[in-house]
Image (cartoon, rainbow, N blue to C red):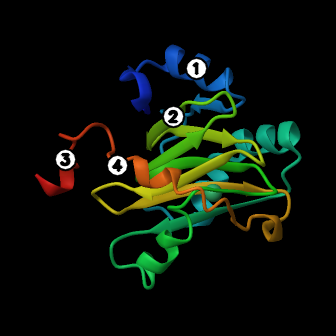
């Protein structure tokens, strides 16, 4: 289950209904897909895509996406820091950013047009759809692990455009609160 925090006024949203409604008011879709299918989180990508074929198909029809893949990073991923450095500064894409989390954790900061920055910590079972053009940045959490289904209209469109605003520097990349420790580290 995701957690959404608005640092500006110290508010946290932790129920599915609250999160769905808050994010929808900023044009962001949020859904829970779990426990929809019994597929191991380390199953081969083809198996994961097959298990969620119906959900993927519905998203494709709604958003015009044509391809889906599975991104898989962990602390041993080669070039991980360089990869993360591309996305931890405020940017936007010409395509929607659509992610369904299979394993691990991630932290999206969304800089809304209305003003506040939303910190959205996601974990397995969370679907997030960030419309193209939305200002945002992304960090991994303490486990430095994320596995997610991604959907694209055109993978070439999924290139970051940077704002160089520096606003990302005002927010700590804290996932699920400062006290959060992933189970694997306990
Ligand atoms: Fe992005």
Report the disc number at residue 181.
3
Which residue is at a point 48% across and 33% down the rendered structure image?
A: 35
Q: Is residue 41 visible?
A: no
Q: Which of labels 3 and 1 is toward the front?
A: 1
Q: Are marks 4 and 2 in contact (CB under 8 Å)?
A: no
Report the disc number at residue 22.
1
Q: Does the residue tagged 2 have its C-beta within 8 Å of any atom of ligand 1?
A: no
**Which residue is the site of mark 2?**
118
Q: Secondary structure at mark 1?
A: helix
The residue positioned farthest toward the bottom in the image shown:
78
Chain-order first, disc 3 or disc 1: 1
Ligand 1 occupies quarter: bottom right
Q: Is residue 124 above or below residue 156?
A: above
Chain-order first, disc 1 or disc 4: 1
Q: Are marks 3 and 2 in contact (CB under 8 Å)?
A: no
Q: Secondary structure at mark 2?
A: strand
**Which residue is the site of mark 4?**
172
């Amino acid at each position: 289950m995701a957690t959404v925090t608005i640092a500006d006024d110290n508010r946290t949203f932790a129920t599915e209904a609250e999160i769905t409604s808050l994010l929808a008011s900023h044009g962001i879709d949020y859904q829970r897909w779990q426990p929809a299918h019994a597929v191991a989180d380390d199953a081969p990508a083809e198996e994961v895509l097959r298990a969620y074929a119906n959900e993927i198909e519905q998203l494709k029809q709604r958003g015009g996406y044509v391809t889906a893949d599975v991104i898989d990073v962990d602390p041993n991923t080669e070039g991980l820091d360089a990869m993360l450095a591309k996305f931890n500064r405020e940017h936007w894409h010409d395509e929607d950013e659509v992610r369904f989390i299979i394993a691990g954790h991630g932290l999206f900061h969304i800089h809304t047009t209305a003003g506040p920055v939303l910190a959205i910590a996601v974990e397995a079972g969370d679907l997030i759809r960030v419309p193209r053009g939305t200002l945002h940045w992304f960090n991994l959490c303490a486990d430095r692990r994320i596995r997610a289904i991604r959907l694209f209209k055109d993978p070439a469109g999924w290139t970051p455009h940077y704002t160089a605003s520096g606003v990302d520097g005002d927010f700590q990349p804290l996932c699920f609160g400062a006290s959060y420790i992933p189970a694997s580290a306990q």
